[in-house]
Image: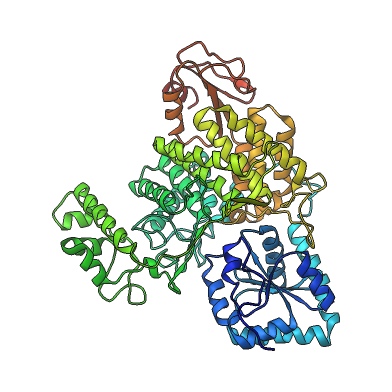
């Protein structure tokens, strides 16, 4: 069968990832009823290939296999081939990823899952080199034709395996979690930590921001110097390592080595958002200048490279440019000396740049020596040294702009935008920069205007000026959390009320009374081979853990016992998983600390709340909600407070309130 690269059905899709495969020799179809009916009518197995636009190995497999004439002809003859964007359809991605993990133990993208004509998976795997791929799909095709009963049996077993993986078994004897159990969980978790380089002991190394947000809270309650040292080592090694873009700011997705030097160069919005939040929180406990620099540079990078004119945030920037991974970010020694002239020697020493190169005859910028040490070597103080480094960066930014840029995927994803809004708020709270709160509110207003209906129903994506796809649980959970954060930073009650409205919609559309957890997809969404319940915290916290934390917070603001009940039941439901694997349930661990440790309700009221609110924001005070107003408030938390004084600050906990005071300093004296 002769084929051409104009055959497939992806050219008119909104997804950049799908359009990138429009000229493949494989006859790709987008996911939908039409292609499933085609598979049934032709009685062919389905190949569902899932990836995303900034995925390096997705591009590699495309070049090696999906543009190979022999491989494409075989795929077209023996399979119905579907391409899906994991960012556009995370529900599909989650289910078929679970199938791959259960069936082969392999995960990651590109995800290639084989399914019956009705979409039920029977095997899943990830990237394969072209010859191995051809042999593998030939074997699948042969089994389909000659031993179909094996395929059917595999599909049944896999469906059971996936369901047992995503539907947690209720422990009828489970009790509320205890502080002693949390401490034991942490002691087991500590064995997985790399005390030399930071992060976890395994490679590749992902930053895992939510794990370190848990650690910050844990060590604030239970003094642990070893953990404090580990947090500092991890955050400094990431901020100084090659995983961080020292020219323009921003973090790559992960490092391939144990020392955080060699990045996988794609930049994801969700990583950068969560790392800004983490470094902002960490700065409150340990005001290290590298933390502040990482926050400021990354937020400027987000503003210049990943923000739409309307105020939304783009999803990702590719790892590859000109067909080579990382090419945009790598430097040869002579390029640096040509651009920087007399300052090149100093700059090269600071960023470990050598003539022979530190990575494939080029250089990845990373810091091994303290700025004070190098400044002293060149006979100058630290401040002028930093000024020279900053000037050099500006020159290299201009030089780098002449290169072919990696592609930016301009889809705007609701959940990830909410994480970015929260990042701006966290940075504003720590550093007090008015620009940060302005950018946060601009992002929130973009969501409100384009992705949230008047009745609080969300859409998942804004792409090419159109809001598309029903939202998923993470869209609701992270948006509700971001709007709570805006309220806490501004005392504008509009955002807290909108957060409650969104949460009520989520309960109505996603909550399952039988499991006492939330489904990932709405009851009104397309029905897949099963319905996922996401509880594992990974690089992004799970939608259930985030919703449980939102419910707990809103229960305090609105004195809503039903919210509190759901949140506490959810924690009990996953208790065994949390205690068995803290590293993959860190956000649940934060919820446990919120529910177990003293939790304060702090109101700031009166004629001038602004300055005291900013002072309170700068403190690391994880187990507290803040609220208030300059005039009256109808929120249950703030009703009946003193609005006549210039300033009145009151803390309550465990159903009792301390006396009102006139400053944050006085408040801290009371609650020591």
Residue 236 x %, y %: 38, 54
- Left or right: 55, with 39 as reference point: left
Residue 488 x %, y %: 53, 31
The residue nearer to you, when weighing 521 against 195, is 521
Residue 144 x %, y %: 80, 83
- Looking at the picture, does residue 453 appear above or below residue 21? above
- Identify the image quadrant of residue 433: top left
- Looking at the picture, does residue 120 appear above or below residue 183? below
- Left or right: 342, with 658 as reference point: left
- Looking at the picture, does residue 530 appear above or below residue 420? below
The residue nearer to you, when weighing 179 against 456, is 456
The residue nearer to you, when weighing 101 against 135, is 135
Q: Residue furthest right?
A: 149
- Left or right: 170, with 22 as reference point: right
- Looking at the picture, does residue 218 appear above or below residue 202? above
**Quadrant placement of the N terminus:** bottom right
- Identify the image quadrant of residue 4: bottom right
- Identify the image quadrant of residue 570: top right
């Amino acid at each position: 069968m002769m084929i051409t690269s104009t055959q497939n059905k992806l050219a008119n899709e909104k997804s950049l990832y799908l359009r990138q495969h429009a000229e493949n020799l494989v006859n790709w179809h987008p996911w939908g009823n039409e292609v499933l009916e085609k598979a049934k009518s032709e009685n062919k197995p389905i190949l569902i290939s899932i990836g995303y636009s900034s995925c390096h190995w997705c591009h590699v497999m495309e070049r090696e296999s999906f543009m190979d004439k022999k491989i494409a002809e075989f795929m077209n003859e023996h399979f119905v081939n579907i391409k899906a964007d994991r960012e556009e359809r995370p529900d599909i991605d989650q289910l078929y990823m679970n199938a791959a993990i259960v069936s082969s133990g392999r995960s990651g993208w590109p995800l290639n899952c084989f399914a019956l004509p009705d979409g039920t998976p029977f095997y899943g795997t990830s990237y394969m080199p072209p010859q191995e791929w051809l042999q593998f799909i030939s074997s699948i095709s042969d089994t389909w034709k000659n031993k179909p009963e094996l395929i059917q049996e595999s599909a049944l077993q896999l469906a059971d395996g996936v369901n047992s993986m995503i539907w947690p078994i209720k422990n009828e004897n489970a009790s509320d979690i205890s502080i002693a159990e949390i401490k034991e969980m942490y002691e087991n978790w500590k064995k997985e930590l790399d005390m030399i380089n930071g992060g976890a002991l395994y490679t590749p190394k992902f930053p895992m921001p939510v794990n370190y947000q848990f650690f910050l809270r844990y060590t604030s309650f239970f003094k642990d110097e070893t953990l404090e040292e580990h947090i500092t080592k991890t955050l400094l090694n990431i901020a100084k390592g090659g995983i961080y873009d020292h020219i323009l700011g921003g973090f790559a997705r992960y490092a391939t080595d144990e020392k955080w030097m060699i990045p996988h160069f794609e930049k994801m919005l969700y990583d950068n958002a969560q790392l800004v939040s983490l470094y902002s929180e960490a700065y409150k406990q340990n005001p290290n200048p590298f933390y502040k620099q990482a926050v400021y540079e990354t937020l400027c990078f987000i503003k210049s490279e990943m923000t739409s004119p309307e105020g939304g945030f783009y999803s990702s920037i590719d790892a590859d440019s000109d067909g080579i991974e990382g090419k945009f970010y790598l430097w040869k020694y002579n390029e640096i000396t040509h651009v920087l002239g007399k300052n090149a020697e100093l700059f090269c020493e600071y960023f470990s740049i050598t003539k022979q190169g530190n990575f494939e005859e080029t250089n990845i910028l990373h810091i091994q020596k303290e700025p004070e040490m190098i400044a002293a070597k060149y006979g100058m103080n630290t401040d002028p040294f930093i000024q020279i480094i900053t000037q050099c960066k500006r020159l290299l930014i201009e030089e780098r702009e002449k290169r072919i840029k990696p592609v930016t995927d301009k889809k705007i994803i609701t959940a990830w935008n909410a994480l970015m809004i929260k990042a701006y708020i966290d940075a504003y709270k720590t550093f007090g920069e008015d620009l940060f709160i302005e950018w946060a509110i601009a992002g929130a207003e973009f969501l409100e205007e384009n992705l949230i209906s008047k009745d609080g129903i969300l859409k998942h994506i804004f792409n090419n000026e159109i809001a598309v796809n029903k939202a998923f649980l993470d869209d609701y959970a992270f948006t509700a959390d971001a709007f709570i954060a805006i309220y806490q930073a501004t005392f504008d009650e509009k955002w807290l009320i909108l957060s409650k409205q969104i949460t009520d919609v989520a309960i109505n559309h996603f909550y399952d009374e039988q499991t006492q957890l939330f489904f990932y997809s709405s009851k009104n969404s397309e029905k897949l081979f099963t319905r996922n319940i996401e509880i594992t915290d990974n690089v992004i916290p799970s939608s259930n853990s985030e919703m449980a934390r939102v419910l707990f917070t809103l229960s305090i603001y609105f004195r809503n016992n039903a919210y509190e009940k759901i949140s506490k039941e959810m924690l009990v439901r996953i208790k065994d998983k949390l205690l068995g694997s803290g590293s993959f349930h860190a956000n649940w661990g934060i919820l446990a600390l919120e529910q177990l440790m003293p939790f304060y309700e702090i109101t700031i009221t009166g004629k001038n709340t602004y300055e005291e609110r900013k002072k309170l924001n700068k403190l690391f005070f994880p187990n507290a909600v803040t609220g208030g107003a300059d005039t009256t408030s109808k929120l249950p938390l703030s009703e009946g407070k003193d609005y006549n004084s210039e300033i009145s600050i009151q803390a309550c906990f465990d159903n009792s309130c301390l006396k009102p005071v006139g400053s944050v300093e006085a408040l801290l004296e009371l609650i020591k």
